[in-house]
Amino acid sequence: MQQTLTPARVMRALAPLAWIGPAVALIGVVVVWPVVVMIQSSFLRISRFGVVQGANGADNYTKLFAEPDFGGVMARSLVWVVAVVTITVLISLGLAQLFDQRFPGRRLARWALIAPWAASVLMTAIIFKWMLDPEVGLINMVLRDLGLLDALGGAGADPLGNAATAMPWLIFVAVFVSVPFTTYALLAGLSAIPADVYEAAKIDGASRFRTYWSVTLPLLRPALVVATLINVMNVFNSFPIIWAMTHGQPGYSTATSTIFMYILKGSDIGESAAMSVVNFGMVIVLTVIFLKVSKWKTEVS
Amino acid sequence: MKKRLVGAVTFGLSAALVLTACGSESPSGGDATAGGEVRLKLVAADYGDGPTADNSGDKFWKGVVEEFQAANPGIKVDVQVINWNDIDKQVATMVQNGQVPDILQTGDYSGFVKDGLLYKTDEVLSPATSSDLLEKFADFGKVDGTGYGIPFVSSARALFYNKDLFDKAGIAEAPKTWDEVKAAAEKLKAAGVTQPFGLPLGNEEAQAESFLWFLGNGGGYKDASGNWAIDSPANVEAFEYLKGMVSAGLTTPNPGTKNRKDVWADFAAGKVGMVNGGPMSIPIFEKGGLTNFGVAPIPGKTGPLDTTLGVEDWIMAFNKNGRKEEIKKFFDFFYGGTAAQKISDTYKLLPVTKSGIEKLSSDEKLKPFLDALPNATFYPFQDPKWSEVNTQIKQTIGGAIDGDPKAVLGAIQKVATAN
């Protein structure tokens, strides 16, 4: 039968638009349009005070790549993402397993885990910064009382003062705020695994480790992939923790690319936009690599 | 007679400027909202301790605006107060989106001049107001001989020292040279003071602390002929000296990550022996419970500085909305009335008008700063590169303490001299 464009047919074809239209419009306005503007800005010369002074070709990118700190910042961002996400997922796998067991006070424990998630990340970061204050920080006072620290006020009591000791603390705080969400995502995944597969494993005489490795983990994969992916993007774009605790200092030695982008915004908005585009590209590349590696589409056999 | 002629010429000139300005203006310029009421948008930096503090900028400006509105029916002023850390970026966003304020009070005006966003000073100030401004300060508001920035408040720096700690360490008087600073710091350290010399080289105001040490060695950001000289031998030597002090444990630990606010708080808590500060730090120290402190000129390498860092903050008028008559009324009200003095009283900032300085000259605590003001050295903020250089200094100069001063200062110099 020949397809003709009768009004009724057109109406029927357009009908779904009424349902998806608002969502498409919303995505267009709040996601696609800013991306377009961001990419546009990265090719413009913009004064520090926000006035567009004309096209700038690829100069913003040339300038960005020539920044002496650029390489270090990108490498640090990668280490930051890998370290935070890996540690978070490992801890969360254990915690999820624990919270999946029945034990007295489980409800309370589950609620308590939400606390770091519910608190503002900026607030958490500032509190940790205060606890690490070289003169009056709580953590330092405890360390001194335990005899692990000679005296307050010196360089030894100032872990946020140099990159080698600041980075582990920054990573710790990032893990601390990421664990609750990840644990809950995995917990949901665990409770979706039917009990009969465990029974089957038991009948087959599988060891505990074997059961976990061959039954739990494969069935948990969808939840694990989603949780990890969301973490990768979140952590890569994470701003408040580093900004509040070290401001990327000393120098740029604790700055990730998101922090670097924000600092550049104070001197050259075009270059900062170029950094944003590079960031955006990085997130996409990381996501694609991750999805490839995790073979997210293949069915669990 | 002559004066009147000058006045007439000025009037004629400004009228001509107004006419040319009107020519390029959008039809929406000078728009009045319904009922003939004009709304001015004022954006200002917060000199107080944040939005909830008693001395918040919000409360201060609301008080000023209420008085102004009562005296000038038909003009409403909307105030937005932004903290110092965010004001530059937020104003940039406003400009980017075409929502410029009519009046802006902040730390820099020069960047807006290049983009042609500001009214000239004589378009928005009456002769009486402009003649009361200190000439030296008003001169810093000029770009190529034309005034754009209107001095708002100023401050100068001096060395604060904790007299109790000095007594405890057996130091008789404030140090005058770098070596005396070091000797005093060693004595303070021996007496158990954890931070003998407070050294904030973190992003908040690293450019100020560094500048004071540069000046102490006859250096600075620019040389005598006005060229950038950030990695000059004098400046490098200053940082080598600081480096020695830091590694001997005589200063704030890891100064490249420490902010002025925190070091001042430590001084107020009696944990710091000496620190560079300004009149605005007096209320902070007193609020923190420290009253027995002395103020002395800043030590240089061979003797106390005959200059100091002067900082001037600015107020300026944007021309986009064409509301210069209303803005002029507001400025006359601000400088002619009690508002300008109230800001000096509340925040211990130094006035910028002749009448204001006269009124304060009897204040004992402010006297050292008022005396230092005439000889003060300012940042090279009229250079269009300064803002970019300043960002770089704030972020990286503290790295000269751990790394190689020559290399770190050289990298900043490179930013300053790049095209």
Image: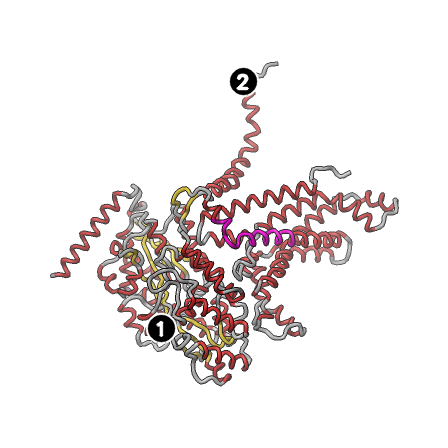
The chain under label 1 reads B
Label 2: element kind: loop
Point out the image quarter for the N terminus of chain A.
Answer: top right
Point out the image quarter for the C terminus of chain A.
Answer: top right
Structural crowding at the residue carrying mark 1, measured as other residues with C-alpha within 10 Å and reported as few (<14), some (14–19) or many (≥20): many
Query: Which residue is pictured at 56% across the width and 16% down the height?
Result: A4
A106 or B315: which is nearer to us? B315
Residue B105 belongs to magenta span? no
**Numbered range of the magenta stretch:** A63-83
- Asked which colour scheme the image uses, the reply is secondary structure
Query: Is residue B328 visible to us here?
Result: no
Q: Which mark is residue B154?
A: none
The chain under label 2 reads A
- The location of residue A173, given as percent across then percent down, is 62, 59
Query: Which residue is pictured at 42% across the width and 71% down the height?
Result: B277
Is residue B18 shown above or below B191?
above
Q: Is residue B127 left or right of residue B177?
A: left
Q: Is residue A290 left or right of residue B294?
A: right
Q: Which image quadrant is residue A130 in?
A: bottom right
Query: Which residue is pictured at 31% across the width and 70% down the height?
Result: B374
Disc 2 target residue: A6
Q: Nearer the viewer, mark 1 or mark 2?
A: 1
Q: Which mark is residue B369?
A: 1
Q: Is residue B143 left or right of residue A117?
A: left
Structural crowding at the residue carrying mark 2, measured as other residues with C-alpha within 10 Å and reported as few (<14), some (14–19) or many (≥20): few
Main SS class of the magenta portion in the image:
helix
Q: Amino acid at mark 1?
A: Phe
Q: Amino acid at mark 2?
A: Thr
Is residue B98 shown above or below B188?
above
Q: Residue furthest top?
A: A1
